[in-house]
Image: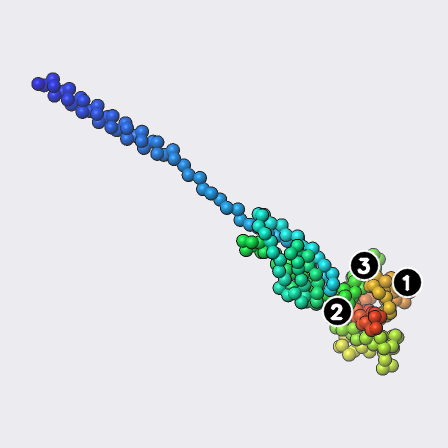
Amino acid sequence: MKIVKRIVCIALALSMVHAVSMNSYVSAATTTTTTTASTTATTKITLSKTTAKLVQGKTLSLKATVSTNKKVTWTSSNQKVATVDSSGKVKAVGKGIANITARTSDGKTAVCMVTVITKNEAYIEDVIRLTNEERTKRGLSKLTVNSRLAAAAQKRASETAQKLSHTRPNGQSCFTVLKEYNIKYTTAGENIAYNYYTAADAVEGWMDSKGHRDNILNAKFKNIGVGLYEKDGVKYCVQLFI
């Protein structure tokens, strides 16, 4: 009887060991399971320019670079200033500022701020740039644009359309216009150009004339104002220096 009891106890013990072994195996197997997360690409869009200046009537082709294959549409914030077609070609219509926006089909945007200036404003900017180039080529400092001097030059440009002279239509000296605009000076100069179609032609004409060239290259002058007036298709341009 004692021998039988021992055999039963041993059998039970073996059975318990087997059960533990099976549980450990199953647990180890479940730890090998892995999951893979899916990722979605984010669209990014950039433009070839973020700011631009155009003269009325001129065009600019903007290029959009998109990181995905999303479709791009183009819009203008002010079509009276600038329009844009489906390919990103911008046309300057009228003076002002317009934001040109490229938008992807999933809502991402990029913007170029376009400033449109008139042909006369472009002419004046070119006169100032070319004048300063003549100075810097000779080691002289650039002239600074003075807003009041520019207003006085614009007044003189309209006056030269009436009387092409350094004497004003009222018979006074051209420099009396400076007092009208509260401009103080110790030395002043004036250049007049008539019927030059481009700014480059006007500056070249002045540089070919000693008196006009001396004004442009006068080291005492620090400020410039340029005016442009057009009458019957003829341009009248005036430079004032102080």
Q: Amino acid at mark 3?
A: Glu
Callout 3: SS = helix
What residue appears at the point 60 percent right and 49 percent down from the top-left corner?
A: 66
What residue appears at the point 12 percent right and 21 percent down from the top-left corner?
A: 5
Residue 153, quarter of picture: bottom right
Q: Position of residue 124 (x, y in %)?
A: 78, 66
Q: Position of residue 204 (x, y in %)?
A: 87, 62
Packing grade of label 2 (10 A; few <14, some 14-19, many >=20) is some
Above or below, 4 against 43 in this view is above
Q: Position of residue 147 (x, y in %)?
A: 74, 70
Above or below, 6 against 202 in this view is above
Q: Give the camera-side residue of 211 and 202.
A: 202
Comparing labels 1 and 2, the label whose residue is closer to the camera = 1
- First reached walking from the N terminus: tag 1 or tag 2: 2
Query: Going by the image, does 180 lie left or right of 7?
Result: right
- Residue lying furthest bottom: 170
Q: Amino acid at mark 2?
A: Asn
For the N terminus, which image quadrant? top left
Residue 146's disc is 2
- First reached walking from the N terminus: tag 2 or tag 3: 3
> Mark 3 sits on what residue?
133
Q: Give the camera-side residue of 154 and 230.
A: 230
Label 3 – label 1 distance at C-alpha? 15 Å
Q: Amino acid at mark 1?
A: Asp
Q: Is any part of residue 169 visible from this angle?
A: yes
Q: Position of residue 79 (x, y in %)?
A: 65, 65
Packing grade of label 3 (10 A; few <14, some 14-19, many >=20) is some
Packing grade of label 1 (10 A; few <14, some 14-19, many >=20) is few
> Mark 1 sits on what residue?
208
